[in-house]
C-alpha cells in the first residue's frame, strides 16, 4: 500500500544510524543509504543530517516521520479490512440442482433473505437423478452441497439430512401422450381400473404407501413397483409400456412424451430444503432466516 522506503526511513530515524537500521532490517548499510537517498531525491527534501556520529532528522524529516507512522498504521488497517471483505465475499453456498430436484424453490426464498447475508454468494452444482446414486448425493450435503431442494418424505433421505418444509406438491399421475387417458383434465381412482400403475416400492414414503393402500383395495388395478427413487428411466418406462405413473405436479415438464393429470384424491408430498445434519452456523443462520420469512408469510 505504501512505499517500502518509508519503513527504512522510520527505522533509520528511530535508531539514529544507517548501520543500526541495516541490522534491524537485515539488509546491508549500503542498501539503507541507497533507499534513503532515493527517497530524498523523490521528495526533493533533505530528511537527515549526516555526521560522523550518526544521523538526525531535519525539520522536514521530523514532519515526514510523524505522518509516515500514521500512513503505515492507516495502510495496515486498510489492508486488514480489505482482507476481511475478501473473506466475506468469498463465502459461497453450494446449491445442488437436477432435472427432478431443481434449485429454483431455494432461489426464490434465498432472494427474500439474501440482504441479511451481505457478501455471500451462491454456486449452483448440478447432479444426476440416479436411483442408485441419489443417497450418496444426499450424504454429500456439507461437502459437495450446502443445500438441496426436493419433494421428500423418504425415510432413507431424512435419515441422512435435515429438512425445512417450504410447501407441498399434489400427487398426480402421468401417462403417455398416446394413452387413452391423456386427454382427460382430471381422473378418479375408478378411471385407473384395468391399468398398470407404477409407484415406488412400499416402505419408504408414507404418502405413497397410503396411495398404494387405497389402490390395493381394487383388484382391477395392477401395481408395478419402481425403484424407491425416481430417475429418468422410470419416466421412460412409463411412456414405453403405456403405464400410469404416480408422480408430482412439479414434474409435469420432466418428460416431453408424458402428460401429467390431477387425480381426485387428497394426497400431497412436502417439498423443502435439505441441509446437513451437522451444519455450521452460517448454514443454520440461512435456514433460520428462511424459516422466519416462511412463518411471516403464513401469519399474514
Image (cartoon, grey):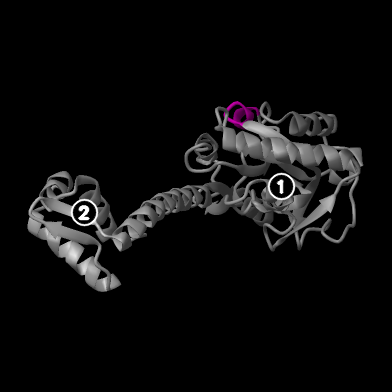
Which numbered disc, 1 or 2, marks the residue that appears first in the sequence? 2
Residue 160 lies in magenta, yes or no? yes
Q: Is residue 216 above or below residue 143?
A: above
Q: Residue at x 67, y 50 (%)?
A: 114
Q: Residue at x 67, y 37 (%)?
A: 287
Q: Residue at x 82, y 37 (%)?
A: 295
Secondary structure beneath label 2: strand
The residue that disc 2 covers is 56
- Place of residue 246 in the rendered image (x, y in percent of width and height, measured from the top left): 75, 44
Residue 113's disc number: 1
Residue 234 lies in magenta, yes or no? no
Relative placement, left or right, of 103 versus 124 is right
- Place of residue 11 in the rendered image (x, y in percent of width and height, measured from the top left): 23, 49
Q: What span is in magenta?
A: 155-161
Residue 223: name its quadrant: top right
Q: CA distance from mark 1 to mark 2?
A: 60 Å
Amino acid at each position: 500500500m505504501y512505499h517500502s522506503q518509508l519503513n527504512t526511513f522510520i527505522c533509520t530515524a528511530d535508531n539514529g544510524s544507517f548501520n543500526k537500521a541495516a541490522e534491524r532490517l537485515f539488509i546491508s548499510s549500503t542498501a539503507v543509504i541507497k533507499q534513503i537517498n532515493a527517497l530524498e531525491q523523490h521528495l526533493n527534501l533533505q530528511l537527515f543530517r549526516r555526521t560522523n556520529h550518526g544521523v538526525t532528522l531535519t525539520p522536514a524529516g521530523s514532519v515526514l516521520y510523524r505522518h509516515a507512522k500514521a500512513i503505515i498504521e492507516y495502510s495496515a488497517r486498510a489492508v486488514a479490512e480489505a482482507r476481511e471483505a475478501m473473506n466475506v465475499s468469498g463465502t459461497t453456498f453450494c446449491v445442488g440442482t437436477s432435472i427432478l430436484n431443481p434449485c429454483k424453490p431455494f432461489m426464490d426464498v434465498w432472494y427474500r433473505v439474501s440482504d441479511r447475508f451481505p457478501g455471500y454468494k451462491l454456486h449452483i452444482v448440478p447432479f444426476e437423478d440416479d436411483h442408485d446414486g441419489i443417497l450418496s448425493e444426499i450424504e454429500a450435503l456439507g461437502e459437495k452441497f450446502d443445500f438441496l431442494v426436493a419433494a421428500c418424505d423418504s425415510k432413507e433421505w431424512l435419515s441422512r439430512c435435515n429438512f425445512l418444509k417450504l410447501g407441498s406438491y399434489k400427487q398426480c399421475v402421468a401417462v403417455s401422450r398416446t394413452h387413452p387417458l391423456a386427454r382427460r383434465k382430471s381422473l378418479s381412482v375408478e378411471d385407473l381400473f384395468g391399468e398398470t400403475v407404477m409407484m415406488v416400492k412400499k416402505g419408504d414414503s408414507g404418502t405413497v404407501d397410503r396411495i398404494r393402500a387405497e389402490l390395493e383395495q381394487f383388484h382391477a388395478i395392477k401395481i408395478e413397483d419402481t425403484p424407491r427413487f425416481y430417475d429418468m428411466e422410470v419416466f421412460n418406462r412409463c411412456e414405453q409400456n403405456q403405464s400410469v405413473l404416480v408422480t408430482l405436479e412439479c414434474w409435469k415438464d420432466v418428460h416431453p412424451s408424458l402428460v401429467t393429470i390431477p387425480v381426485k384424491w387428497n394426497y400431497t408430498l412436502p417439498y423443502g430444503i435439505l441441509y446437513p445434519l451437522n451444519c455450521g452456523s452460517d448454514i443454520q443462520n440461512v435456514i433460520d432466516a428462511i424459516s422466519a420469512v416462511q412463518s411471516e408469510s403464513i401469519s399474514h
